[in-house]
Image (cartoon, rainbow, N blue to C red):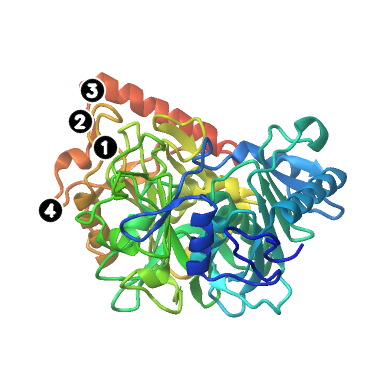
Amino acid sequence: MRGVRMTRGVNGLMLNPSQRLTPAELIEVAIQRKEGVLLANGAFCAHTGKFTGRSPKDKYFVDYPGCALPHEQHQWLSEAQFENLFRKVVQHLDKTGSFVFDGAVNQHPVHRVPVRFYTEFAWHNLFVQRLFLEGDATTQPLYTVYSAPTLKANPELDGTRSETFIVLHPGRGIVLVGGTEYAGELKKSIFTLMHHHLAERGVVPMHCSASLGQQGDVALFFGLSGTGKTTLSADPNRKLIGDDEHGWGDDGVFNMENGCYAKCIHLSAEKEPDIYNAIRFGAVLENVVYDPFRHPLYDDSRLTENTRAAYPLSHVRNIEPSGRGGHPRVIVFLSADASGVLPAVARLTPEDARRHYLLGYTSKLAGTERGVVNPEPTFSACFGAPFLTDSPTRYADMLMDRIQRHDVAVYLLSTGWVGGGYGATDRMPLSLTRQLVNMVLSGALNQVDTRRDDELFLNVPVQIAGIPDKYLRPELGFASAEEFRERRASLVQLFRQALGRYEPLTVR
């Protein structure tokens, strides 16, 4: 494999085989190769075809000698199948040419890991440069990702389910991605490997955003895609540590990356100015529709609801440049609940927090994965089951140990359709969610009177000044009391079934 290999070039452009291209050079090459277009706001926009989200059913681990990962939790390929597919990928990239980026993951100097990406597409290389730390080409990478989106697997020969494949070999530090142009697979493959790498070193890997207050107080926001991690951590009164992936070690939290990967459906300068203004030259847009004058149409979902923007943290005006913070004071679990049963906010005991962390309950939003059209209730352990390499209880125990050791307050916020559910009511207003977040972060809700819900593991505030009662008593938003009771009973049963996968549940 030779860095960038374009012997004939594009329009006469010749590149050194070992050259690493800058973002501006990558944009130039990507436009020449017709991989996408430059929009009026300066961002590069690519459309990813039929794959507009991750393909978790096409993700595999390699069953190498000495592999200690739980077999029942993953799909597997043999070492021989991996070798055959690896050879195909290398030959494919050698034929098409590839772009190289030597980067790194983890902002903490003790835990920083060198990573290398070989990408068939120039814009994919731009994408990983936006999200990961600068590395050193002279340092041997611990993990290497090979991206060959136009190469399709042969299921009969390669042991895959389809022509798409995301294959991780932790033992050799190799990731193969093929048959999909969706760039999110590159980002999440490294996140998956970090769940193994960091946990082995006593660091808690977390699917969360993090921000730093003026008093040095750290807040973490856990949640699946579309629940509000990026939006709620982009607060003009707080410094952004990171929007998606963090580690929590003995001296505090740190961002794994150096960029943001935000959903931008219905994005506006009024509602989310920090994200809106970060999308400029050097940023990457995925599957955003644009008008004849190349202005992005953020409200247009004809390609997907999962439109995305990738941009470096340097594009955000209020960041913590170190990418690090101390131990968190507050943790917020976010759920885009489509049932309408969960209240807008609830306080969690440590026992509640462990259960909700194992549940990872939310609604899978349209476009995040293939085939999802309307919100669907789903349970994703640790708010990131597709990225876990070990048992969810291991990560839950690690997190709970940190929470109890540092006396962290934990809250659950519903950013979904409180009272009535999806289709019967509007989604929780962002302005009210921000108001609740500010109260949580200030400690204003720590002492309010609550009512206990043993079946949903919640302590719900009885009343909050400025928050309408319907957001604290979801039953008020349903057409009838009977409809609410039925919907709630169904959610309680789903909670019981999901928790039963991990341990017996005793409800008082």
Q: Amino acid at mark 1?
A: Val
456 up-or-down from 250: above or below: above
473 up-or-down from 411: above or below: above
**Are the residues tagged 2 and 1 within 8 Å (C-beta)?**
yes
Label ID, residue 355: none
User: Disc 2 and disc 4: Cα gap in Å?
Assistant: 19 Å
Q: Secondary structure at mark 4?
A: loop
Q: Nearer the viewer, mark 4 or mark 1?
A: 1
Label ID, residue 477: 2
Q: Nearer the viewer, residue 267 or 195?
A: 267
Q: Position of residue 476 (x, y in %)?
A: 19, 31
Would residue 118 be visible to someone looking at this image?
A: yes
Where on the picture, by quarter, is residue 132? bottom right
Count how many numbered circles sit on residues in the image.
4
Which residue is at 46% across, 65% downward?
259
**Are the residues tagged 3 and 1 within 8 Å (C-beta)?**
no
Q: Nearer the viewer, residue 427 or 173?
A: 173
Which residue is at 34% across, 25% downward?
487
